[in-house]
Image: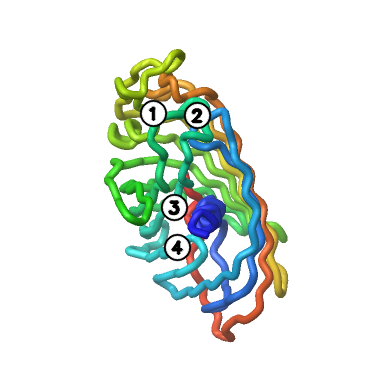
């Protein structure tokens, strides 16, 4: 059941879309699926599909949803700063050839502020810059460990039509503890075809994301495609990087059972890096 929560968080960490007026709270049924690599650079992937109940609460400065908790810290004409996070799924190393015999990768919680700056806005189209700074903690619920920082500046183009859509181009950077967690190979983990490797901090490649969603009276449809390219990353030569390109795909449908009569106008969710 815990992994199902992480799957749900991973799909919604892809983010949405444009500012909207929606019920202050709503509850319903969520059904979704996702296909994703074990980690960035892996050549093995997993597929998940599941139904779950959901509950969302919104205010002008706070939101509790399937993604977790998000709060607005500052807002001006073209700038706003919020705080939020995302979840990376855990990995069973015995089910991944490149990592076989190594420690399992716990779920990674990334938490921190994001600065959003609107560069251009006209009618139904918005071009913005976002700068998310995240502290990363790995956890198996019983134990939690610090895994460094990520900083992933991005350009975001949003468009509102019947299908609200957004496109993101992000440049990924991370500190040494983060890269060590995912890409280090210690002396004890050396095997034929898996040499010792020490990861360093720095550039981690690019990410392209396309996200879309349409809201109907009682239900909504949505999905995303995310492309990662690790060419030029500081850990590109790690034996654990078996593929320099990854694609992640997610689809979902929600059905609303109950909602409040009060409507809230809230800022768009982060388009997560």
Spot occupied by residue 239 in the image (x, y as percentages of width and height): 43, 20
Q: Going 46% across and 14% down the picture, which residue do you hit?
A: 193
Q: CA gap, disc 1 to disc 4?
A: 27 Å
Front one among 78 and 184: 184
According to the image, label 3 marks what residue? Answer: 86
Q: Residues within 10 Å of mark 3 (few under 14, many from 20)?
A: many
Closer to the camera: disc 1 or disc 4? 1
Q: Is residue 144 visible?
A: yes
The outermost residue toward the bottom is 261
Q: Which mark is residue 41?
A: 2
Residue assigned mark 4? 68
> In the displayed structure, does residue 64 sit left or right of residue 19?
left
Counting residues from the start of the chain, the first of labels 2 and 4 encountered is 2
SS state under label 1: helix
Among the two numbered marks 3 and 2 on one chain, the one whose residue lies closer to the N terminus: 2
Residue identified by numbered label 1: 183
């Amino acid at each position: 059941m815990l992994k199902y929560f992480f799957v749900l968080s991973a799909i919604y960490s892809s983010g949405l879309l444009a500012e909207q007026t929606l019920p202050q709270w709503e509850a319903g049924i969520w059904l979704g699926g996702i296909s994703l690599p074990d980690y960035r650079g892996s050549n093995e992937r997993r597929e998940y599909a599941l139904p779950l109940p959901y509950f969302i609460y919104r205010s002008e400065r706070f939101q509790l949803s399937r993604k977790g908790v998000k709060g607005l810290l500052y807002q001006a004409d073209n700038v706003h700063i919020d705080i939020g996070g995302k979840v990376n799924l855990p990995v069973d190393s015995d089910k991944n050839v490149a990592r076989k015999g190594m420690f399992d990768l716990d779920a990674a919680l990334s938490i921190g502020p994001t600065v959003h700056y609107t560069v251009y806005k006209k009618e139904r189209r918005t071009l913005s810059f976002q700068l998310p700074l995240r502290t990363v903690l790995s956890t198996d619920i019983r134990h939690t460990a610090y895994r460094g920082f990520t900083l992933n500046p991005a350009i975001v183009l949003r468009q509102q039509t019947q299908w609200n859509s957004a496109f993101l181009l992000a440049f990924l950077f991370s500190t040494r503890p983060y890269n060590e967690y995912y890409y280090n190979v210690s002396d004890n983990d050396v095997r034929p075809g898996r040499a010792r490797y020490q990861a360093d901090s720095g550039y981690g490649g690019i990410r392209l994301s396309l996200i879309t969603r349409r809201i109907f009276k009682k239900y909504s449809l949505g999905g995303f495609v995310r492309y990662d390219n690790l060419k030029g990353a500081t850990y590109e030569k790690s034996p654990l990087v078996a593929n320099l390109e990854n694609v992640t795909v997610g689809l979902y449908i929600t059905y609303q059972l109950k909602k409040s009569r009060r409507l809230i106008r809230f800022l768009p969710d982060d388009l997560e890096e």
